[in-house]
Image (spheres, rainbow, N blue to C red):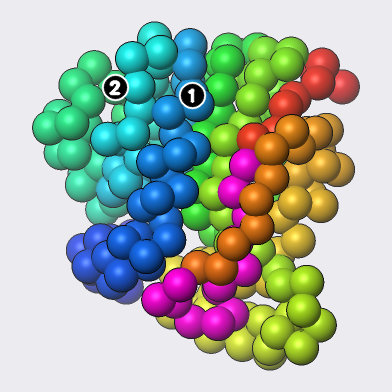
Amino acid sequence: MSLWGRIFAAGYDHFMSAPEKATLGPHREALIPKAAGEVLEIGGGTGANLPFYGAAVEALTVTEPEAPMARRLQRHVDERRPGTIVLAAPAEDLPFEDSSFDVAVSTLVLCTVEDQPRTLRELRRVLRPGGRLLFLEHVRSDDPRLARWQDRLHGLQLRFGHGCHCNRPTLETMRAAGFQTVELERDTLRKAPPIVRPLIVGVAESGPAP
């Protein structure tokens, strides 16, 4: 893990505090309680979703591939939701059998995975037929002018955002992977730079694995 990776993990909760309060927190509060049964969360970060999982969750597994984040995640799991399984695994190569989970959760993760289409195929694989993906992601803007700025500043965001791609057409890639959106809300991520403000929140359903 690079020095910047350790610094990024140490400061993540601090520099995300304003967007969390303004936009992300209310969306998590509305979205995450929809999880039920056996649940997988990818890229759990420092555990921002943990307080919102309800009693309908029978078992919770959270993956986080970066060690500095995973250490903070484990501390928060111990404090907020003991019994949660934390695994160091990339979203592109999930160590689970087919049809293992009822629900998958991805919040601010599909922007940073190295291979977004493969990640979504993996999520579809490990979900049971009819399983749901709960998502909260910033995406490529529908406004052509802002989208051009996302393209221009992509390199800077990739570097200083620790692998964050600000211009991914995530919703389209999700649908191409076999997910059908059943709930979708578009919003603006307030208290954040303009290139990462376009936001999608919702629920998608998985069909049978191809």
- In the image, what residue occupies the spot 40% across and 24% down? 61
CB under 8 Å between callouts 1 and 2?
no
Name the residue type under label 1: Ala
**CA distance separating discs 1 and 2:** 14 Å
The answer to whether one can see residue 113 in this image is no
- In the image, what residue occupies the spot 64% across and 25% down? 132
**Picture coordinates of residue 180 (x, y %)?**
80, 33
Left or right of residue 114: residue 16: left
Residue nearer the viewer, 42 or 32? 32
Examine the rendered structure and indicate whether residue 171 appears above or below residue 146.
above
State the quadrant of the C terminus: top right
**Picture coordinates of residue 202 (x, y %)?**
62, 42
Q: Nearer the viewer, mark 1 or mark 2?
A: 1
- In the image, what residue occupies the spot 70% across and 64% down? 168
Mark 1 or 2, nearer chain start: 1
Residue 35, numbered label: 1
Left or right of residue 135: residue 30: left
Q: Which residue is mark 2?
A: 84
Say what secondary structure mark 2 lies in. loop
State the quadrant of the N terminus: bottom left
Name the residue type under label 2: Thr
